[in-house]
Image (cartoon, grey):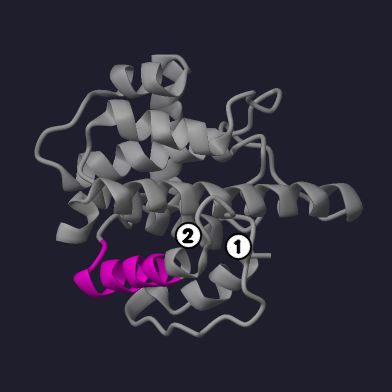
Amino acid sequence: MAELENPSVMSKLIAFLSSLLERVAESNDLTRRVTTQSQRVSVFHGLSRPTITIQSYLERIFKYANCSPSCFVVAYVYLDRFTHRQPSLPINSFNVHRLLITSVMVAAKFLDDLYYNNAYYAKVGGISTKEMNFLELDFLFGLGFELNVTPNTFNAYFSYLQKEMTLLQPLSLVVVPSSRSVITFNDDEASHQKQQQQLAV
């Protein structure tokens, strides 16, 4: 998508994605504290919450990964698929950073002709190469190795992101409209609408 090559679009996309993931993580953290709903601990969970914000982390990945801008949309698709396939492993403040670096790396490997190796992504993400290797493997199994994103699916996710970005005020990314338009997806992405409502809580 040519629009993604525009630096202002990418900065808005990163800001919106980080805002969305921040809200999801906070909501799931609260749910875990309030209810007795069990959440599985996995290789993605850190011992403590990272001190770097989600937005700063995503900006760091964007700056140093040198992957195509489409990788960030595909990484978002992967995160959505992952949370749908792994409902006992919701995104929270202990796993969001590791899920992000892994999803972007896997997207880059799948989409781009040239990409960095796991050791490089591990340095960008602030983790060891061994951990990066484990994260990648667990993420791939968590996705059921379903990495292909059809053009229709990509366009549906990107259109959703574009629409949501236009609803946001500059620098006030906490505002979420209470009435959302419904997007319908084809193929295996029919659950996206339900997931978006859960993610935006």
Mark 2 packing: few (<14 Cα in 10 Å), some, or many (20+)? many
Name the foreground residue: 150 vs 143: 150
Tell me which label, 1 or 2, sits earlier in the chain: 2
- The answer to whether one can see residue 126 in this image is yes
Q: Amino acid at mark 1?
A: Leu
The disc at residue 35 is: none
At horizontal 22% and vertical 37% (from top left) the residue drawn is 67
> In the picture provided, is 136 more to the left or to the right than 33?
left
Q: Residue furthest left?
A: 113
Task: Check the image and report above or below for 125 versus 182.
Answer: above
**Mark 1, residue position:** 199
- Classify mark 1: helix, strand or loop: helix
The disc at residue 80 is: 2
Q: Cβ–Cβ below 8 Å for labels 1 and 2? A: yes
Q: Amino acid at mark 2?
A: Asp
> In the picture provided, is 23 more to the left or to the right than 144?
right
Give yes or no for residue 151 being in the magenta stretch.
yes
Residue 128 location, quadrant: top left
Q: Which residues are magenta?
A: 149-163
